[in-house]
Image (cartoon, rainbow, N blue to C red):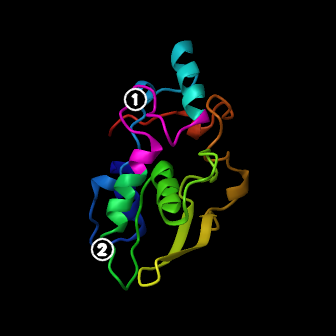
Amino acid sequence: MDRSLETARLALPGREIRGDRRLREMPMGLVEGLTWAEAPPSTRQAIRQWWKTPYDLPFPGSTESLHDVTLRVQDWLSEMPDEGRIVAFTHGGVIRCCVWALTGPPQDRSWSLELGNTGIVRIRYDRTRNTAILVAHNDLSHLPDAWNLPPGQQVPGEQPSGSPSARIGHRPV
């Protein structure tokens, strides 16, 4: 959450910033802070298996699945005001779960949304009609040369070498 809060402070200077633990990223268990190459072969195999059904199974060495994250995101969404705008700074797994909580998860329970670092997702939600419209997804127009960046989410171990996104999990700050 530290990275998200810092991004919020940089993007919205002088505004009140509040953290909410329900928007924290899914714990990365056995690989927290490691690159793919640093993960033992047995762990890499466990992640490949998890990757096939990430919505249903906890991440290896963790206690949460994407379904569990979706439940805490739904809890957060249930507290949204009836009117107004909410700006949330969070992580890729949480964003996917937020979109899935409003639109339904993909039928095959696979990763179905590409997200780049600092990509903007805009959702228009009408609580009175219980409808959600995905207005913008993975908007990187604020970044120069955004399309030259490596994709935000790829199959583990397939990230370009030397990529800043080559870490699987993040060590706490």
Query: Magenta span covers which residues?
Result: 52-69
Q: Are marks 2 and 1 in contact (CB under 8 Å)?
A: no
The label nearer to you, 2 versus 1, is 1
Above or below — where is 83 with respect to 48?
Answer: below
Q: Which residue is mark 2?
A: 14
For badge 2, the amino acid type reads Gly
| SS label for mark 2 | loop
**Amino acid type of the residue tagged 1 in the rendering:** Gly
Q: Residue at x 28, y 53 (%)?
A: 21
Tell me the SS state at disc 1.
Answer: helix
Kindly identify which residue carries mark 1. 29
Give the image location of residue 86, x and y in percent: 39, 74
What count of labels does the image hold? Answer: 2
Q: Specify whether residue 6 is in view.
A: no
Sequence-wise, the earlier of marks 2 and 1 is 2
Q: Nearer the viewer, residue 153 or 101?
A: 101
Vertical placement of 44 versus 100: above or below?
Answer: above
Q: Nearer the viewer, residue 139 or 100?
A: 100
| Real-space Cα separation, disc 2 to disc 1, in angstroms | 35 Å
The image position of residue 97, as x and y in percent, is: 48, 54
User: Mark 2: few, some, or many residues within 10 Å (few <14, many ≥20)?
Assistant: few
Seen in the picture, residue 75 relative to 128 is either above or below; the reply is: above
Residue 17: image location, x then y, percent: 29, 67
Residue at 64% in and 28% down: 157
The disc placed on residue 10 is none
